[in-house]
Image (cartoon, rainbow, N blue to C red):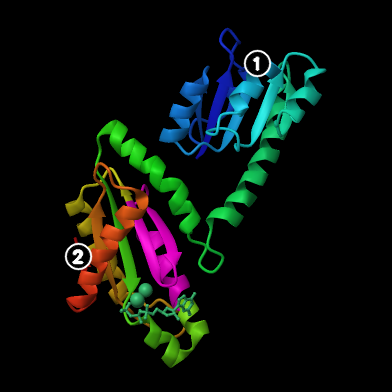
Amino acid sequence: MTNILFFSSPGQPSLGVLESLDPLYYNVFHCHTVEDARRHTELNRIDVLLFAGSVDAFELARSDAAITDLPCIAFGSNATDRTAFIQAGADFYLPAASTQDDFEACFSRVETSLRKVEQLAYRDPLTGAFNRRYFDAMAPVLIKRAQHYQTPLVIALLDIDRFKQINDTYGHAFGDSVLIGLACLLEQHKRPADFVIRLGGEEFVILFPETDAEAAKREMNRLLQLVRETSLVEGSPYYCTFSAGVAKWHEGLSPGGWLKESDLLLYEAKRAGRNRIMG
Ligand code: GH3
Ligand code: MG
Ligand code: MG
Ligand code: MG
């Protein structure tokens, strides 16, 4: 799903080209003011900004921290705007009267570079799972949504049991295969709206939007059971267990404080004998 923020100056007609986007794959958020734009960026992880209006309005909008870094296509009313928009930070410029084909060609360029950036910035190269940077970007958005819609939000911090022994006994490369196997298994069997993130080492976070603590614990026990009974390395049967701490987000808790709460529960799970969920 690609989230598009369409910022147009008041009175500016909507762009016909936007209607060609398949709503199954694209969300378009419309806004006319910087305040509105900021609200959307707080509640959604925006991928790309489309702007239609004057260069002055663009410069003003672009100076706001919420949207200054978003990849951007600017639509101007005359071809002489091109240089000014590019100088003001637009990545692409299209005349407002562009054809569908022009727009699609430009948009597919933007999407290709988005995918590359996402791969480099937000994915862990070993397992392909989301990484710590993704957690840092996503947690504030999910927290804002939980506040706004008054929905519960839960995190689980999980850590493989006795992982050091795996490395010491079978070697580091085998340990890596276990990490890859675990990341794939979790990704394949998590519920579609949950997020699996490799925080570092043999620690993973699972984010459970719109889920209360009891349901998240049930989910974690289901995943733990699955991990126990599934070989993680192809060709050489290998089974492991993990321990996890499950912590609900509550008012006033920063992403860092939230991780700390789940870490304390994880520590309790380890102390109580590992291979269990605490929360
Ligand atoms: P516990 O049950 O208390 O969690 O024991 P543990 O052995 O899993 O805990 P510890 O934190 O002592 O060990 C984690 C090990 O994970 C140590 C480190 O060498 C290993 N490790 C961290 N990152 C990687 C990695 O990317 N690949 C491999 N193969 N090992 C890693
Ligand atoms: Mg650890
Ligand atoms: Mg440890
Ligand atoms: Mg461990």
Q: Please tell me whether residue 254 belongs to the stretch shown in magenta.
A: no
Disc 2, ligand 1: is the CB inside 8 Å? no
Labelled pair 2, 1 in contact (Cβ < 8 Å): no
Residue identifier under label 2: 278
Ligand 2: quadrant of the figure:
bottom left
Q: Choose the circle earlier in sequence order: 2 or 1.
A: 1
Decide which of 147, 99 is in the foreground and name it. 147
Residue 110, horizontal then vertical, whole percent: 67, 39
Residue 21, horizontal then vertical, whole percent: 57, 29
Q: Residue at x 53, y 58 (%)?
A: 123
SS at badge 2: strand
Rendered position, 148 above or below 158:
above
Q: Please tell me whether residue 185 belongs to the stretch shown in magenta.
A: yes
Residue identifier under label 1: 53
Question: In the image, what residue type sits under mark 2?
Answer: Met
Residue 187, horizontal then vertical, whole percent: 41, 60
SS at badge 1: loop
Rendered position, 130 above or below 91:
below
